[in-house]
Image (tube, rainbow, N blue to C red):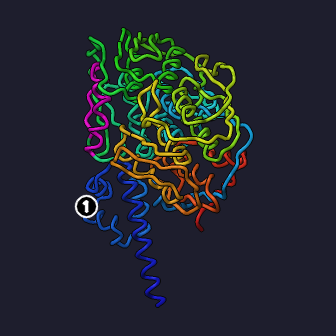
Amino acid sequence: MDGMTEATTTEGYKNRIGNLIRDARKHRGLTQHQLADLLNTSQSAVNRIEKGHQNLSLEMLARIGAALDSEIVAVGAGPTHLRVTGPTTLSGEIDVKTSKNAGVALLCASLLNRGRTTLRKVARIEEVNRLLEVLTSMGVQARWLNDDNDLEIVPPRDLDLGNIDETAARRTRSIIMFLGPLLHRVDTFELPYAGGCDLGTRTVEPHMAALRPFGLEVKATDGSYHAQVNQAIEPERPIVLTERGDTVTENALMAAALHPGVTVIRNASSNYMVQDLCFYLQRLGVTVEGIGTTTLRVTGLAEIDVDVDYAPSEDPIEAMSLVAAAIVTKSQITIRRVPIEFMEIELALLEEMGLQYDRSEEYVALNGHTRLVDITTKPSELHAPLDKIHPMPFPGLNIDNLPFFAVIAAVADGQTLLHDWVYENRAIYLTDLNKLGARVKLLDPHRVMIEGPTSFSGTELVCPPALRPAVVILLAMLASKGTSVLRSTYVIHRGYEDLAERLNQLGANIETFRDI
């Protein structure tokens, strides 16, 4: 009998590991064949692994973890988990931290400047750490100045692109945003990236359409972008982006900053991180007109060599996370430094659903532009909205804020339809809320129907590989009766700094632990 139990347990573990690997692979946008190429194995072997039919050595687990940038299957100190005891009532005050996405864009943009860039209160998250590893491997001097997370960046006279830290580069999504700043500095260069060949071509194509007018050509092969620049080519007419993407707009802006003429970018994103980049470029002496609109007019400089000091604004997605935490736990908390112009649609929708809150007079962020308010939530009985909830490019409901409405809808009375039209697979992770007692029905890869209200109860779950759904599960655990465990939370550390500790300061009971 004992042998039978042991065999069953082993099969169970293999199945769980297989499922984790499959989910992480899909989140990276890789086919089984592409993962097999990265691991130097066959597609059939990957298929067996994902079905739990394959014994795995520790070395193979470590290699899969590295290929998928997923600490789920990394070997070493072991993944961190969170133990949440609920239900929780939060109280007190909390400041919204600066924007992760702005911090990432500004690190890339610092390559435009030959002088010193000092960035204030940078989000100290894993994505930023990876980018700093890449920058320092290229010869950039970067150092944290103090406990306020002020960061100083001094580029070398010549970048050492031959020495780039491949491991760190493959572990960040943001490496593609080096294309815009680098195309003026060198005629040929290579950048390693994560993912297979097909994905590389598909991901790079919108960026290429934006950067070809500056003479850049990129081939994506073997996990590297091979870039060549013809410096004689200059934009002759407005650059029209076919997709209003944040990173594509940022790449076009950075390329335009070092082009000593006028570049017009149409259908540009006007989202918060793009605005922060525009304000930073203005500090560098670049003229940027149309900030906050979808047409940007940039008058660039042949060379930028200035010492600048810039403070990115606060993160509207973190602000929304904190508002959602207050709603699902029926708590009164004060959330300070909320960038209101990037939260207005969300708050208007929540008001329609019955949320009561107070807000302060507006004041200005340290960047001198972004409007901030303090919000005090009140315990409220919410009802489902009359219409479906769907995101739109700014000034619509933020695409990254949509998942938080899943956990909010779960505690609201009635049926709510969420339509996540941007991402192919993100909505599927919201069904994990069902394991905590919610009623979330997946209608298709983009739409979920949520029936509320919900009495959440604690359980053990593996963190979804997508950042926002992972935080949504954590918030539901705050409202759950009993003890919950959220396993392998690296994905949350990629985008949030000390989230569990900061929720604890508001009265949550979240304990971080590792398996021995």
- The answer, for residue 156, to whether it is visible in the render is no
Task: Single out the residue that lies furthest toward the bottom.
Answer: 1
Residue 307 as seen in the image, left or right of residue 219: right
Q: Give the class, few, some or many, for how many residues have Cα within 10 Å of label 1's Cα (few <14, many ≥20).
A: some
- Residue 193 belongs to the span the image colors magenta: no
Residue 43 as seen in the image, left or right of residue 489: left
Q: Main secondary structure of the magenta part?
A: helix
- Residue 198 belongs to the span the image colors magenta: yes
Image coordinates of residue 196 in percent, x first then y, are 29, 47
Vertical placement of residue 301 versus 192, above or below: above
Residue 321 as seen in the image, left or right of residue 72: right
Where residue 174 sits, quadrant-wise, is top left
Q: Residue at x 42, y 42 (%)?
A: 417
Image coordinates of residue 230 in percent, x first then y, are 26, 21
Rendered-image quadrant of the C terminus:
bottom right
Vertical placement of residue 349 versus 4, above or below: above
Q: Secondary structure at mark 1?
A: helix
Residue position marked by numbered label 1 in the rendering: 43
Q: Residue at x 68, y 37 (%)?
A: 378
Which residue type carries mark 1?
Gln
* Relative depth, front residue between 208 and 454: 454
Magenta segment: 197-220
* Relative depth, front residue between 44 and 418: 418
Vertical placement of residue 343 versus 459, above or below: above
* Relative depth, front residue between 431 and 199: 431
* Relative depth, front residue between 448 and 404: 448
Residue 516 as seen in the image, left or right of residue 390: right
Image coordinates of residue 408 in percent, x first then y, are 54, 44
Image coordinates of residue 213 in percent, x first then y, are 28, 19
